[in-house]
């Protein structure tokens, strides 16, 4: 009997390419201004980061709920290596640590870390600063491990508005956090240099490529990875402030 959870492949899915193109335009136009705002740590910046991160978590989860399409296209072995559960778990932990660092930076944690202590703070305040605060940020950041590394049963079949809505929301959420991360990197960049291009590209690739790889694997959409690779290059260029 035919599996009703598997949607028919009705045509080429250009949605990821369109979303990446829109994001590329936003990178060029918005990142310089946004990086100026993020250069000064502020609570509003931290709330912005946390808010987009929550949308990111929901978006990745929705993409993983999409039922696979029928196609003979498959990812090369060197790409499927990164989709192994253990590899995804490691990358999701790295992502969580990066997210925690970004939140801590915007809350001004690093500015007071070396100066605050029992001699200038009472025991309760010191515990909040050194234990409870970082613990809460780490707990929130590590939610990504459950979303990316743990199994998710695909349940959304193709053809409906909910299916395409999940695609649009998921891809937009990933690209939105990628844009914000690029702006944050640019904000802390010491000096513009081509030497930063490759490190930034690799860093952003390790953090943001896994959900797109999962999407490409399930939707049999290899060409969407080409568009995302180009988008990461533009992100690296903007992040290096070139």
Image: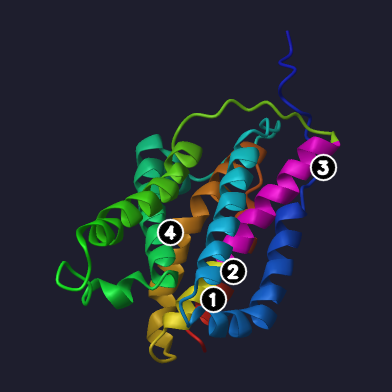
Q: Which residue is mark 1?
A: 183
Choose mark 3 or mark 2, whichever is in front: 2
Q: Which residue is mark 2?
A: 179
Left or right: where 148 falls relative to 222: left
For this rendering, which residue is in front, 21 or 178?
A: 178
Q: Which residue is mark 4?
A: 99
**Magenta region, main secondary structure:** helix
Contact? badges 1 and 2 (CB < 8 Å): yes
For this rendering, which residue is in front, 44 or 77?
A: 44
Based on the picture, tell me whether residue 107 belongs to the magenta stretch. Answer: no
Would you identify the image quadrant in which residue 234 lies?
A: bottom right
Left or right: where 111 falls relative to 235: left
Q: Residue 47: give x, y in percent of width and height.
A: 55, 63
Precedes in sequence: disc 3 or disc 1: 3
Whether residue 239 is visible: yes
Relative to 116, residue 8 above or below:
above
Q: Residues within 10 Å of mark 3 (few under 14, many from 20)?
A: few
Separation of residues labelled 3 and 1 (CA atoms): 35 Å
Separation of residues labelled 3 and 2 (CA atoms): 29 Å
Q: Which residue is mark 3?
A: 11
Total number of numbered discs in the rendering? 4
Which residue range is magenta in the image? 161-179
Residue sitting farthest toward the left: 119
For this rendering, which residue is in front, 45 or 189?
A: 45
Precedes in sequence: disc 3 or disc 2: 3
Relative to 68, residue 182 above or below:
below
């Amino acid at each position: 009997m035919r599996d009703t959870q598997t949607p028919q492949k009705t045509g080429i899915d250009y949605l990821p390419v369109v979303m990446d193109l829109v994001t590329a335009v936003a990178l060029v136009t918005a990142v310089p201004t946004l990086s100026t705002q993020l250069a000064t740590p502020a609570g509003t910046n931290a709330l912005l980061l946390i808010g987009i991160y929550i949308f990111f978590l929901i978006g990745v989860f929705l993409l993983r709920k999409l039922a696979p399409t029928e196609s003979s296209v498959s990812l090369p072995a060197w790409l499927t290596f990164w989709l192994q559960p253990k590899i995804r778990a490691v990358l999701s932990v790295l992502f969580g640590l990066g997210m925690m660092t970004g939140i801590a930076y915007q809350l001004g944690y690093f500015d007071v870390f070396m100066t605050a202590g029992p001699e200038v703070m009472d025991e309760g305040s010191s515990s909040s600063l050194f234990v409870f605060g970082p613990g809460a940020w780490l707990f929130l950041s590590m939610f990504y491990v459950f979303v990316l590394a743990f199994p998710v049963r695909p349940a959304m079949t193709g053809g409906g508005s909910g299916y395409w809505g999940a695609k649009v929301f998921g891809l937009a959420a990933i690209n939105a956090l990628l844009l914000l991360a690029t702006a944050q990197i640019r904000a802390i960049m010491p000096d513009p240099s081509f030497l930063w291009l490759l490190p930034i590209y690799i860093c952003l690739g390790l953090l943001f490529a896994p959900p797109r790889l999962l999407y490409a694997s399930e939707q049999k959409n290899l060409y969407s990875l080409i568009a995302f690779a180009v988008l990461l290059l533009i992100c690296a260029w903007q992040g290096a402030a070139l």
